[in-house]
Protein backbone atom coordinates (compact mmCIF):
# COMPACT_ATOMS: atom_id res chain seq x y z
CA UNK A 1 0.00 0.00 0.00
CA UNK A 2 1.29 3.50 -0.81
CA UNK A 3 1.91 6.10 1.87
CA UNK A 4 -1.26 7.97 0.90
CA UNK A 5 -3.43 4.99 1.94
CA UNK A 6 -2.06 5.15 5.49
CA UNK A 7 -2.35 8.94 5.62
CA UNK A 8 -5.97 8.79 4.41
CA UNK A 9 -6.81 6.18 7.05
CA UNK A 10 -5.25 8.41 9.72
CA UNK A 11 -7.17 11.44 8.41
CA UNK A 12 -10.45 9.51 8.66
CA UNK A 13 -9.72 8.45 12.25
CA UNK A 14 -8.74 12.04 13.08
CA UNK A 15 -12.02 13.39 11.67
CA UNK A 16 -14.01 10.79 13.62
CA UNK A 17 -12.19 11.76 16.81
CA UNK A 18 -12.81 15.46 16.14
CA UNK A 19 -16.52 14.70 15.70
CA UNK A 20 -16.48 12.93 19.07
CA UNK A 21 -14.76 15.87 20.79
CA UNK A 22 -17.26 18.35 19.35
CA UNK A 23 -20.44 16.39 20.05
CA UNK A 24 -19.97 14.43 23.27
CA UNK A 25 -21.60 15.94 26.34
CA UNK A 26 -19.67 13.92 28.92
CA UNK A 27 -16.16 15.14 29.70
CA UNK A 28 -14.84 11.55 29.69
CA UNK A 29 -16.34 11.09 26.21
CA UNK A 30 -14.48 14.21 25.04
CA UNK A 31 -11.23 12.70 26.34
CA UNK A 32 -11.97 9.51 24.35
CA UNK A 33 -12.28 11.62 21.20
CA UNK A 34 -8.93 13.27 21.95
CA UNK A 35 -7.40 9.78 22.30
CA UNK A 36 -8.63 8.88 18.80
CA UNK A 37 -7.16 12.06 17.33
CA UNK A 38 -3.76 11.47 18.96
CA UNK A 39 -3.80 7.90 17.67
CA UNK A 40 -4.35 9.13 14.13
CA UNK A 41 -1.31 11.38 14.51
CA UNK A 42 0.76 8.38 15.64
CA UNK A 43 -0.26 6.43 12.52
CA UNK A 44 0.96 9.38 10.44
CA UNK A 45 4.30 9.54 12.28
CA UNK A 46 4.98 5.81 11.92
CA UNK A 47 3.89 5.77 8.26
CA UNK A 48 6.19 8.68 7.38
CA UNK A 49 9.03 7.05 9.30
CA UNK A 50 8.59 3.75 7.43
CA UNK A 51 8.29 5.25 3.96
CA UNK A 52 11.28 7.54 4.43
CA UNK A 53 13.29 4.79 6.12
CA UNK A 54 14.10 6.96 9.15
CA UNK A 55 13.52 5.66 12.71
CA UNK A 56 13.31 9.23 14.08
CA UNK A 57 9.59 9.10 13.36
CA UNK A 58 9.26 6.04 15.58
CA UNK A 59 11.07 7.83 18.42
CA UNK A 60 8.76 10.81 17.98
CA UNK A 61 5.69 8.54 18.02
CA UNK A 62 7.02 6.98 21.24
CA UNK A 63 7.29 10.44 22.84
CA UNK A 64 3.76 11.29 21.66
CA UNK A 65 2.40 8.12 23.25
CA UNK A 66 4.09 8.84 26.60
CA UNK A 67 2.89 12.46 26.61
CA UNK A 68 -0.64 11.27 25.80
CA UNK A 69 -0.59 8.96 28.80
CA UNK A 70 0.48 11.85 31.05
CA UNK A 71 -2.27 14.00 29.52
CA UNK A 72 -4.90 11.32 30.18
CA UNK A 73 -3.79 10.92 33.81
CA UNK A 74 -4.03 14.68 34.50
CA UNK A 75 -7.21 15.08 32.42
CA UNK A 76 -9.07 12.33 34.25
CA UNK A 77 -7.88 13.66 37.61
CA UNK A 78 -9.36 17.04 36.65
CA UNK A 79 -12.61 15.34 35.58
CA UNK A 80 -12.84 13.58 38.94
CA UNK A 81 -12.19 16.84 40.83
CA UNK A 82 -14.88 18.58 38.76
CA UNK A 83 -17.28 15.77 39.58
CA UNK A 84 -16.47 16.06 43.27
CA UNK A 85 -17.12 19.81 43.28
CA UNK A 86 -20.01 20.17 40.83
CA UNK A 87 -21.56 16.64 40.93
CA UNK A 88 -21.64 16.56 37.13
CA UNK A 89 -19.21 15.97 34.25
CA UNK A 90 -21.56 17.23 31.53
CA UNK A 91 -19.50 19.76 29.57
CA UNK A 92 -22.64 21.84 28.87
CA UNK A 93 -23.13 22.45 32.59
CA UNK A 94 -19.55 23.53 33.21
CA UNK A 95 -19.94 27.17 32.13
CA UNK A 96 -18.58 28.94 35.19
CA UNK A 97 -16.19 31.01 33.03
CA UNK A 98 -18.94 32.18 30.64
CA UNK A 99 -19.06 35.98 30.78
CA UNK B 1 -3.03 -8.83 -3.78
CA UNK B 2 -0.23 -9.15 -1.30
CA UNK B 3 -0.71 -10.11 2.33
CA UNK B 4 0.02 -6.50 3.33
CA UNK B 5 -2.80 -5.19 1.11
CA UNK B 6 -5.30 -7.69 2.53
CA UNK B 7 -4.17 -6.90 6.07
CA UNK B 8 -4.38 -3.16 5.45
CA UNK B 9 -7.97 -3.26 4.17
CA UNK B 10 -9.08 -5.65 6.92
CA UNK B 11 -7.55 -3.57 9.69
CA UNK B 12 -8.77 -0.31 8.12
CA UNK B 13 -12.37 -1.58 8.27
CA UNK B 14 -11.96 -2.68 11.92
CA UNK B 15 -10.25 0.60 12.90
CA UNK B 16 -12.84 2.85 11.24
CA UNK B 17 -15.82 0.84 12.50
CA UNK B 18 -14.58 0.79 16.11
CA UNK B 19 -13.65 4.49 15.96
CA UNK B 20 -17.14 5.35 14.73
CA UNK B 21 -18.58 3.20 17.53
CA UNK B 22 -16.48 5.14 20.08
CA UNK B 23 -18.07 8.45 19.15
CA UNK B 24 -21.60 7.19 18.32
CA UNK B 25 -22.51 4.61 20.96
CA UNK B 26 -24.85 6.11 23.59
CA UNK B 27 -23.34 4.12 26.46
CA UNK B 28 -20.02 5.60 27.60
CA UNK B 29 -18.81 2.30 29.04
CA UNK B 30 -19.25 0.59 25.66
CA UNK B 31 -17.41 3.51 24.08
CA UNK B 32 -14.32 2.70 26.18
CA UNK B 33 -14.46 -0.96 25.12
CA UNK B 34 -14.67 0.10 21.46
CA UNK B 35 -11.75 2.46 22.11
CA UNK B 36 -9.73 -0.56 23.25
CA UNK B 37 -10.55 -2.33 19.96
CA UNK B 38 -9.60 0.80 18.04
CA UNK B 39 -6.28 1.12 19.90
CA UNK B 40 -5.35 -2.52 19.26
CA UNK B 41 -6.23 -2.05 15.58
CA UNK B 42 -3.90 0.96 15.50
CA UNK B 43 -1.20 -1.26 16.99
CA UNK B 44 -1.71 -3.75 14.17
CA UNK B 45 -1.31 -0.89 11.68
CA UNK B 46 2.09 -0.29 13.35
CA UNK B 47 2.87 -3.98 12.78
CA UNK B 48 1.99 -3.59 9.09
CA UNK B 49 4.43 -0.67 9.02
CA UNK B 50 7.16 -2.95 10.45
CA UNK B 51 7.37 -1.25 13.85
CA UNK B 52 6.82 -4.14 16.30
CA UNK B 53 8.22 -2.17 19.25
CA UNK B 54 5.51 0.47 18.88
CA UNK B 55 2.92 -2.32 18.69
CA UNK B 56 4.10 -3.51 22.12
CA UNK B 57 4.11 0.02 23.53
CA UNK B 58 0.65 0.62 22.12
CA UNK B 59 -0.72 -2.52 23.78
CA UNK B 60 0.96 -1.84 27.14
CA UNK B 61 0.34 1.89 27.48
CA UNK B 62 -2.87 2.50 25.56
CA UNK B 63 -4.88 -0.72 25.52
CA UNK B 64 -3.59 -1.68 28.96
CA UNK B 65 -3.06 1.58 30.81
CA UNK B 66 -5.27 4.28 29.37
CA UNK B 67 -8.34 2.06 28.99
CA UNK B 68 -8.05 0.93 32.62
CA UNK B 69 -7.77 4.53 33.90
CA UNK B 70 -10.76 5.64 31.80
CA UNK B 71 -12.87 2.71 33.05
CA UNK B 72 -12.10 3.76 36.64
CA UNK B 73 -12.93 7.39 35.88
CA UNK B 74 -16.29 6.38 34.42
CA UNK B 75 -17.10 4.21 37.43
CA UNK B 76 -16.26 7.14 39.74
CA UNK B 77 -18.22 9.78 37.86
CA UNK B 78 -21.29 8.02 36.44
CA UNK B 79 -24.00 7.60 38.99
CA UNK B 80 -25.70 4.91 36.91
CA UNK B 81 -23.43 2.82 34.70
CA UNK B 82 -25.45 1.57 31.74
CA UNK B 83 -27.81 4.51 31.81
CA UNK B 84 -28.39 5.56 28.21
CA UNK B 85 -29.16 9.25 28.48
CA UNK B 86 -28.65 11.43 25.43
CA UNK B 87 -24.87 11.55 25.07
CA UNK B 88 -24.59 14.11 22.29
CA UNK B 89 -25.04 17.84 22.61
CA UNK B 90 -27.09 20.06 20.33
CA UNK B 91 -24.25 20.65 17.88
CA UNK B 92 -24.23 17.26 16.15
CA UNK B 93 -24.81 18.75 12.67
CA UNK B 94 -22.19 21.48 13.18
CA UNK B 95 -19.71 18.92 14.51
CA UNK B 96 -20.28 16.63 11.52
CA UNK B 97 -19.89 19.52 9.06
CA UNK B 98 -16.69 20.75 10.74
CA UNK B 99 -15.17 17.24 10.89
CA UNK B 100 -16.04 16.64 7.22
CA UNK B 101 -14.46 19.99 6.33
CA UNK B 102 -11.24 19.09 8.16
CA UNK B 103 -11.21 15.69 6.45
CA UNK B 104 -11.76 17.26 3.03
CA UNK B 105 -8.96 19.74 3.70
CA UNK B 106 -6.48 17.05 4.73
CA UNK B 107 -7.35 14.76 1.81
CA UNK B 108 -7.17 17.65 -0.64
CA UNK B 109 -3.70 18.41 0.72
CA UNK B 110 -2.75 14.73 0.34
CA UNK B 111 -3.94 14.66 -3.29
CA UNK B 112 -1.87 17.72 -4.19
CA UNK B 113 1.30 16.67 -2.39
CA UNK B 114 4.01 14.35 -3.61
CA UNK B 115 4.36 11.32 -1.34
CA UNK B 116 6.57 8.28 -1.85
CA UNK B 117 4.66 5.24 -3.17
CA UNK B 118 7.28 2.65 -2.18
CA UNK B 119 8.98 2.01 1.13
CA UNK B 120 12.55 3.10 1.66
CA UNK B 121 15.23 0.84 3.13
CA UNK B 122 14.50 -0.11 6.72
CA UNK B 123 16.79 -1.42 9.47
CA UNK B 124 16.71 -5.20 9.92
CA UNK B 125 15.76 -4.77 13.58
CA UNK B 126 13.85 -1.52 13.98
CA UNK B 127 13.54 -2.04 17.76
CA UNK B 128 17.32 -1.95 18.12
CA UNK B 129 17.48 1.17 15.95
CA UNK B 130 14.86 2.90 18.13
CA UNK B 131 16.76 1.92 21.28
CA UNK B 132 20.03 3.29 19.91
CA UNK B 133 18.30 6.53 18.93
CA UNK B 134 16.76 6.84 22.41
CA UNK B 135 20.10 6.60 24.22
CA UNK B 136 22.05 8.41 21.49
CA UNK B 137 20.79 11.62 19.87
CA UNK B 138 17.55 11.74 21.88
CA UNK B 139 18.90 10.88 25.34
CA UNK B 140 18.16 14.33 26.82
CA UNK B 141 14.62 14.32 25.40
CA UNK B 142 14.13 10.86 26.84
CA UNK B 143 15.15 12.06 30.31
CA UNK B 144 12.88 15.10 29.99
CA UNK B 145 10.04 12.71 29.21
CA UNK B 146 10.68 10.97 32.52
CA UNK B 147 10.53 14.36 34.29
CA UNK B 148 7.25 15.10 32.50
CA UNK B 149 5.73 11.78 33.60
CA UNK B 150 6.74 12.40 37.23
CA UNK B 151 5.29 15.91 37.08
CA UNK B 152 2.05 14.59 35.54
CA UNK B 153 1.65 11.90 38.19
CA UNK B 154 2.36 14.39 41.00
CA UNK B 155 -0.21 16.73 39.47
CA UNK B 156 -2.78 13.95 39.26
CA UNK B 157 -2.09 13.05 42.91
CA UNK B 158 -2.48 16.71 43.89
CA UNK B 159 -5.87 16.88 42.18
CA UNK B 160 -7.02 13.59 43.65
CA UNK B 161 -6.14 14.39 47.27
CA UNK B 162 -8.83 15.08 49.86
CA UNK B 163 -8.68 18.08 52.14
CA UNK B 164 -8.48 16.20 55.42
Image (tube, coloured by chain):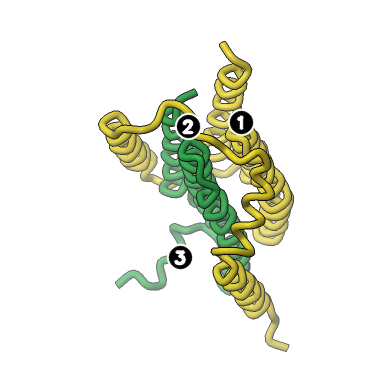
Chain colours: A green, B yellow
Mark 3 Cα within 10 Å, few/some/many (few <14, many 20+)? few
Residue B142 bears which disc, if any?
Answer: none
State the residue at coordinates (64%, 64%): B135
Disc 3 to disc 1, how far (Cα)? Answer: 42 Å
SS state under label 1: helix
Discs 3 and 1 lie in a common subunit: no
Nearer the N terminus, badge 3 or badge 2? 2
Discs 3 and 2 lie in a common subunit: yes
In the rendered structure, the answer to whether residue B99 lies left or right of residue B150 reads: left
SS state under label 3: loop
Q: Chain of mark 3?
A: A
Q: Quadrant of the C terminus of chain B?
A: bottom right
In the image, residue B76 sits, relative to residue A30, either above or below, namely below
- Give the foreground label among 3 and 1: 1
To which quarter of the image does residue B3 belong?
Answer: top right
Which residue does the numbered mark 2 point to in the structure image? A6
- Residue B20 percent location from the top left of the image: 52, 33
Q: Chain of mark 2?
A: A
Disc 3 to disc 2, how far (Cα)? Answer: 38 Å
Please indicate, yes or no, whether residue B35 appears anywhere in the rendered image.
Answer: yes
Residue B48 bears which disc, if any?
Answer: 1
Q: Quadrant of the N terminus of chain B?
A: top right
- Residue A58 percent location from the top left of the image: 56, 49
SS state under label 2: helix
Mark 2 Cα within 10 Å, few/some/many (few <14, many 20+)? many
In the image, residue A22 sits, relative to residue B105, either above or below, namely below
To which quarter of the image does residue A78 belong?
Answer: bottom right
Amino acid sequence: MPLNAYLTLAALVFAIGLFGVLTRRNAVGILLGIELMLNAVNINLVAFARFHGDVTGLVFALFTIAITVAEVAVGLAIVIVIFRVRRTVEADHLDLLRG
Amino acid sequence: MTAETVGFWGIAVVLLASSLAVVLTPNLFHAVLYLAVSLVATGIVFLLLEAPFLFGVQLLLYAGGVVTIVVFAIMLTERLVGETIRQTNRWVINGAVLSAAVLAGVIGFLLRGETPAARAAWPEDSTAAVGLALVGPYAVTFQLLGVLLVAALLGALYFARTDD
